[in-house]
C-alpha cells in the first residue's frame, strides 16, 4: 500500500490535482449532481484541511483572545494501491496529526521536514 501526505496552497487546487491524478473522479449521482468518488486503486482519502501551528487562546466564554496560527496550505492523506507522483505537493513530515491504522505515523520519504516552502 502507498501512503502520500500532501500539501496544497488551498482546497480548490488540491481537488483539481487529485482529479487530474485519478485519485478522485467526478460522477453524477441520482439527483444529476456531480460528486467525487475514489478513482481506481484508491483505498482512502483523508481531507486534513488546515493544520494548527500555534493554538489560539480563549476566555471562559470561548471568546477568542488570540487567533490560532496555521501552517501554510491545505492538507490531504491518500492511501492507494499504486504509487502516484504528486510532485512537490508530496511532503514527508514528522509528528503527523493523522495516520492510517496499521501504518507508520510519520511519513516515509527521502527527507524529513515539516512542510514545503513552495505551494505551487
Image (spheres, rainbow, N blue to C red):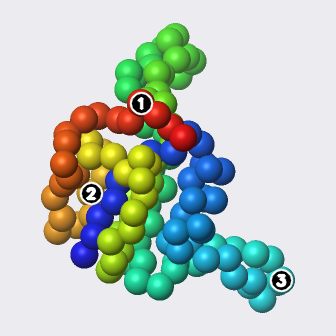
Give the residue displayed 25% in from the left and 35% down from the top: 113
Farthest bottom residue? Answer: 30
Give the residue displayed 28% in from the left and 70% down from the top: 2
**Residues marked 2 and 1 touching at CB (< 8 Å):** no
For marks 1 and 3, the one nearer the N-term is 3
- The mark closer to the camera, 2 or 1, is 1
Mark 1 element type = loop
For marks 2 and 1, the one nearer the N-term is 2
Give the residue displayed 43% in from the left and 37% down from the top: 51
Q: Position of residue 46 (x, y in %)?
A: 43, 61
Q: Is 72 in front, or is 97? A: 72
Q: Is 57 in front, or is 30? A: 30
Distance between the alpha carbons at the discs numbered 1 and 3: 40 Å
Location of residue 111 by image quarter:
top left
Residue with the mark numbered 1 = 117
Residue with the mark numbered 3 = 32
Residue with the mark numbered 2 = 99
The reply to whether residue 98 is in sight is yes
Amino acid at each position: 500500500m502507498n501512503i502520500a501526505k500532501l500539501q496544497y496552497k488551498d482546497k480548490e487546487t488540491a481537488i483539481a490535482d487529485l482529479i487530474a491524478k485519478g485519485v478522485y473522479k467526478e460522477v453524477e449521482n441520482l439527483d444529476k449532481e456531480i460528486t467525487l468518488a475514489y478513482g481506481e486503486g484508491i483505498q482512502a482519502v483523508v481531507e486534513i484541511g488546515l493544520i494548527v501551528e500555534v493554538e489560539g487562546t480563549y476566555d471562559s466564554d470561548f471568546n477568542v483572545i488570540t487567533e490560532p496560527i496555521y501552517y501554510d496550505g491545505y492538507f490531504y492523506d491518500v492511501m492507494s494501491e499504486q504509487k502516484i507522483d504528486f510532485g512537490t505537493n508530496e511532503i514527508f513530515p514528522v509528528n503527523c496529526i493523522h495516520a492510517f491504522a496499521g501504518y507508520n505515523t510519520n511519513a516515509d520519504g527521502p527527507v524529513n521536514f515539516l512542510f514545503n516552502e513552495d505551494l505551487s
